Image (cartoon, helix red, strand yellow):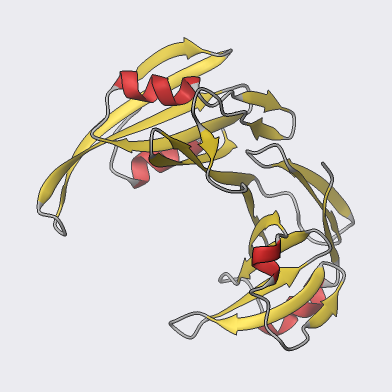
Amino acid sequence: MAAEASVVHRALDGRRFRLAGSLDLGQPFTSVVEVRLGGRGYELTAGPLGLDEEIASAVGVPGLDEELSYRGGVLRIGRASRYDGGIRLVENLLVAAWQGRRYCLVTQLYRASSADALVLMRGLGITEHEDGLSLAPGGGAVFGGPASVIKRVPRFGLLELSPLTAELASRLPRWQGVATTAGELFRDDLGDGSPYFVLAGRDTWATLVPLADTAVDEVAALADRLDVQTVG
């Protein structure tokens, strides 16, 4: 059994989640949020340094070769053109990444210029903390919804945390789940038949997707070794 551990991760909207228990909680985390500006939505992802390069490579951008100092960090931009067979058009993709001391913030824009990326970044109000990045949108930019925190917990699975809202609570099954330290545990199946879980805590909502090292029949026991709560 893993030793007792405790970590706090900050979501992009400033909310902080504390995870504690006898599980391996040492893996890095990411946070995702939608920001709306000028009638358009932008998905922003924060995580450890290096995440920007991983995302750029994954979407076919060969490098973030344009750099300028911005808000105490570095704004890096890369571009690529790719053919979308669905719409039979060439899409021009721009990846913009702000790098701080420990964390970075990444987004993707289509048919955009460096000036467009700067307009978006200026409206975000980026602040770096010891436990993650937070945004304070302004200048017409607003959050499109609560931010989530995503973290891989070995043997347990891929955990996505968000605040428990009335809308989310209304989605809970009518049957009673399994009571665990992390919350009430419900199991369901994805469209392909693979299992996933929902953990409804006191003030948190979590989805858990099993990974290759997850023993599905042990998920309830592992959830009973984990405490999850919002701490600010």
Question: Which quadrant holds the N terminus?
Answer: bottom right
**Observer-nearest residue: 20 or 96?**
96
Q: Residue furthest right?
A: 4
Asked where in the image residue 151 lies, by quadrant, the reply is: bottom right
Q: Residue at x 72, y 27 (%)?
A: 129
146 vs 218: above or below? above
Q: Is 87 situated left or right of 207 in this image?
A: left
Residue at the extreme bottom? 175
Please, which residue is most extreme toward the left here?
88
Work out whether residue 65 can be spotted: no
As rendered, which of 123 and 11 lies closer to the eye? 123
Task: Residue 156: give x, y in percent of width and height.
Answer: 69, 68
Q: Tell me the quadrant of the picture where the C terminus can be found.
A: top right
Determine the image quadrant of residue 143: top right
* Residue drawn 31% across the image and 20% down it: 114
Residue 143 is left or right of residue 224, and the answer is left
Where is residue 75 shown, x and y percent of the image?
45, 20
For image coordinates 62% across by 48% down, the residue present is 146
In the visual, does 34 lie left or right of 217? left
Q: Where does residue 80 sit, x and y in percent of width and height? A: 23, 35
Q: Quadrant of residue 13?
A: top right
Residue 64, image x and y in percent?
35, 26
- Asked if residue 142 is positioned above or below residue 125 in the image, the reply reads below
Vertical comparison of 127 with 175: above or below? above
